[in-house]
Image: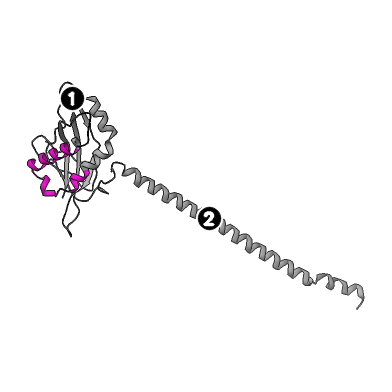
Amino acid sequence: MSEEAKKPEAAADPGPGSDKSGKLGLILSVLNLLLILGIGGVVFMQFQKDKQKESVSDIQAGGHDAAPGDAHGDGHGEAKAEGGHGDAKAEGGHGEAKAEGGHGDGHGAPAAKKGDQVVNLDQFTVNLSTSVGTPPRFARVVIALEVPSAETSAEITQKMAPVRNAIIDLFNSKRPADLQTGEGRNFLKEEIRNALNSFLVTGKVKGVFFSNFAVSN
C-alpha cells in the first residue's frame, strides 16, 4: 500500500491532545454547574432570611399595645368585661369577651368639673397573681385619671413610665377573685390613686375610672 493511502488514517486519529481537551471541557462544565448551584443556594437562603424578618416584624407590630411589665400575649379563652351594658366584645385574645351589667365601671370617665382634667391612659394587659400549677390569668383594662389642672395632666404625661409601672405592680399583686366584685375594684382604684399621688408634685389624682375592664377565664 502506498504512503498516500495511509495518510487519511493518520489524520483520523485524534491523538492524546484531544482526550485532554475533552476532560478539560467536562471539568469546566462541572465547575460551571457547581457555581450556578452555589449562587442559587445563596439567593434561596437570603430569601428565607428576608421572609423570616418580615414575619418577626409582623409579630412585633401586632404586639405594640403591651407595655414593659404587661402580660405577653392576649391569652386564651373568654374574658368577661365587668361593668357596662350590652354585648360589647373585648378586642384581642382568642375568644369573645362578654359584657355583663355593672355599676359604672363600663361607662367611661365622667365629664370633668370646671378646671379639672381627664387623662386617658393606654390600655393595660396585665398578669394577675395565681397559685403555682394554675393557668395564668390576666386583666385588660382602660384607665382614666381625673386631675385638678393642666399642669398635673402634663406631669402625668411626662412621668408615664412610673405611672404605668405603679399600676402594673398593683394588678400583678391581685388575684382574679379580688377583682370580681365592685368592692374589690373600688379598693383597687383607691390603691392606684394613692400610689400615683405618692410621687406627683403639681397636684393630686382626684379620681380613677375604669372605662373598660375584663378578666380572662
Disc ID at residue 42: 2
User: CA–CA distance between discs 2 and 1?
Assistant: 63 Å
Q: Residue at 83% of width from left, 73% of height from top?
A: 9
Could you say where residue 212 lies in the image, as x and y percent from the top left?
A: 17, 37
The residue at which mark 1 appears reads as 116
| Quadrant (top left, top right, bottom left, bottom right) of the N terminus | bottom right
Could you say where residue 108 lies in the image, as x and y percent from the top left?
A: 16, 32
The foreground one among 184 and 159 is 159
Q: What amino acid type should be assigned to the residue bearing mark 2?
A: Val
Is 181 situated left or right of 69 in this image?
A: left
Q: Relative to 158, does residue 37 appear above or below in the rendering?
A: below
Q: Residue at 17% of width from left, 51% of height from top?
A: 129
Label 1: element kind:
loop
Q: Residue at 10% of width from left, 34% of height from top?
A: 104
Q: Is residue 172 magenta?
A: yes
Is 182 situated left or right of 48 in this image?
A: left
Label the magenta part by its dominant secondary structure. Answer: helix
Number of residues whose C-alpha sits closer than 10 Å to that of mark 2, classed few (under 14), some (14–19) or many (20 or more): few
Give the quarter of the image for residue 8: bottom right
The foreground one among 126 and 53 is 126
Could you say where residue 115 lies in the image, as x and y percent from the top left?
A: 18, 21
Q: Relative to 22, does residue 85 appear above or below in the rendering?
A: above
- Which residues, given as a range, are shown in magenta? 168-195
Which marked residue is nearer to the observer: mark 2 or mark 1?
Answer: 1
